[in-house]
Amino acid sequence: MDKAFPRTPAPPYYAVIFSSRRSAVEAGYEDMALRMAELAQQQPGFLGMESARDAQGFGITVSYWQTLEDITAWRRHAEHRLAQQTGRRDWYRHYELRVARVERAYNKPD
Amino acid sequence: MDKAFPRTPAPPYYAVIFSSRRSAVEAGYEDMALRMAELAQQQPGFLGMESARDAQGFGITVSYWQTLEDITAWRRHAEHRLAQQTGRRDWYRHYELRVARVERAYNKPD
């Protein structure tokens, strides 16, 4: 079983699609990313997360949630807010964040 | 302007989130990926695409579309169908495909 793929329930559920280009600032980034992944998992309604970043610093992270309210609560989480602020200022040159409702899902499991 | 980020309109619109683990099969993969990116751009309702793959072969590609009908038409495109078949058989060890309706979007442009 490939752990890069979260096991999500049957739709509908929600996805937060976060696409980003890293800046050159390394200080604090790895620790924050690990801590946020750990913290997200403890939040109500969290269903899973997947993430890929290429050698040029472009990455996509998708987290999955039961409801929009769960996403709002996570966005407002104090420690997460601090990470967001530093992210905007230091770690990301550019990012796009989209909240979407997953309506259908297909797969080829390994 | 960072070309890794497509410029999408105000929501609502649709996203196809394709997460995949590559197999060891290289033959034909790069050509197909380039050709599909080129072909997708020519389809009605195509809004943009973003993609990241890490050194371990785990990748996420998100394409954006105006309507669900546009996504269905692209899925049924003959040349794309052929790529899908070979993908399932040869290029991907595991994949997950999710169709989602983008409801909100935020960004920090560069």
Image: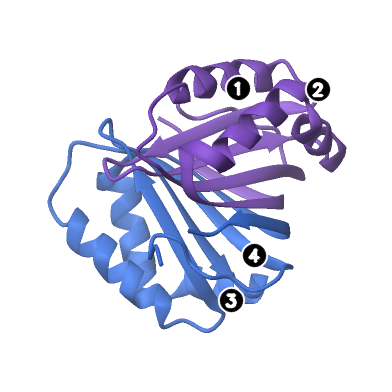
Chain colours: A purple, B blue
The nearer-to-camera label among 3 and 4 is 4
| Amino acid type indicated by mark 3 | Asp
* A61 lies left or right of B35: right
Q: Which of pointers 3 and 4 lies earlier in the amino acid sequence?
A: 4
> Who is closer to the viewer here, A109 or B10?
B10
Q: Position of residue A73 (x, y in %)?
A: 83, 31
Disc 4: which residue: B14
| Disc 1/disc 3 C-alpha distance (Å) | 35 Å
Residue farthest along the left direction in this orientation = B27
The nearer-to-camera label among 1 and 2 is 1
Label 4: chain letter: B
| Disc 1/disc 2 C-alpha distance (Å) | 14 Å
Disc 1: which residue: A36
Label 1: chain letter: A
* B29 lies left or right of A14: left
Disc 3: which residue: B70
| Amino acid type indicated by mark 4 | Tyr
Q: Position of residue A41 (x, y in %)?
A: 66, 19
| Amino acid type indicated by mark 2 | Pro
The nearer-to-camera label among 2 and 3 is 2
Quadrant that contains the N terminus of chain A: top left
| Residue drawn at 25 percent across, 33 percent down | B55
| Disc 1/disc 4 C-alpha distance (Å) | 27 Å
Relative vertical location of residue B72 with respect to residue A60 in this rendering, above or below: below
Disc 2: which residue: A44
CB within 8 Å, label 1 to label 2? no
